[in-house]
Image (spheres, rainbow, N blue to C red):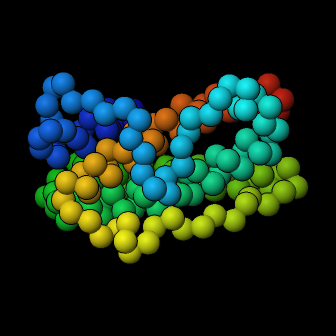
């Protein structure tokens, strides 16, 4: 299932204002969630290992946020098996990507950078509306990272043809 479609399905379960046809949020971020945006020049001058390591760090953190979103949705929508399974499957796919990034970085004779867990009890405990916003932001950020990773991997394939 496409990431954007998954975000739309997730929002359908959140109620207003998320289900309003005109609902759009641009530029929202969440403390501790890695931002995918980067200037072209900065992105282009990254070396291969830095590029891979930034992806590794981002997806390691996104894994934790996806678990938090699943926990939130289990509390808010415990009977929505489709939504909960979609979030679980997405988290498993991200775990697979993190594992593959670890293998690739190791093949380049390096070690992935350590990642600090961004989630604290202050971040986790919040009200219902904030949980809905957090889920939206995490899924949107995940989609942005997927787009960046595709660009990163396309560049890497030119250096390391399959």
Front-lying residue, 47 or 87: 47
Q: Nearer the viewer, residue 22 or 93?
A: 22
Q: Residue at x 51, y 64 (%)?
A: 118
Q: Position of residue 23 (x, y in %)?
A: 21, 30
Q: Nearer the viewer, residue 83 or 145?
A: 145
Side of 29 where 155 appears, left or right: right
Q: Residue at x 16, y 45 (%)?
A: 13
For the N terminus, the image quarter is top left
Figure disc tally: 0
Farthest residue to the bottom: give it: 121
Residue 28 on image: x %, y % = 38, 41
* Residue at x 22%, y 41% (from the top left corner): 11
Which quadrant: the C terminus? top right
Q: Is 159 positioned to the left or the right of 91 in the image?
A: right
Residue 9 visible in image: yes
The residue under the point 35% across, 68% down is 124
- Say whether residue 161 is visible: no
Q: Is residue 45 left or right of residue 151?
A: right
């Amino acid at each position: 299932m496409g990431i954007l479609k998954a975000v739309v399905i997730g929002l359908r379960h959140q109620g207003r204002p998320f289900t309003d046809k005109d609902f759009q949020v641009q530029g929202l971020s969440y403390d501790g969630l890695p931002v995918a945006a980067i200037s072209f020049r900065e992105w282009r001058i990254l070396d291969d290992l830095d590029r891979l390591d930034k992806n590794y760090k981002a997806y390691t953190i996104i894994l934790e946020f996806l678990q938090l979103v699943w926990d939130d949705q289990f509390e808010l929508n415990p009977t929505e098996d489709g939504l909960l399974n979609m979030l679980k499957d997405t988290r498993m796919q991200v775990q697979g990507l993190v594992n593959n990034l670890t293998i690739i970085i190791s093949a380049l004779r390096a070690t992935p950078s350590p990642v600090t867990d961004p989630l604290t009890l202050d971040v986790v405990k919040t009200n219902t509306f904030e949980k809905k916003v957090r889920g939206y932001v995490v899924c949107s950020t995940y989609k942005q990272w997927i787009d960046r990773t595709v660009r990163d991997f396309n560049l890497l394939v030119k250096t390391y043809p399959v």
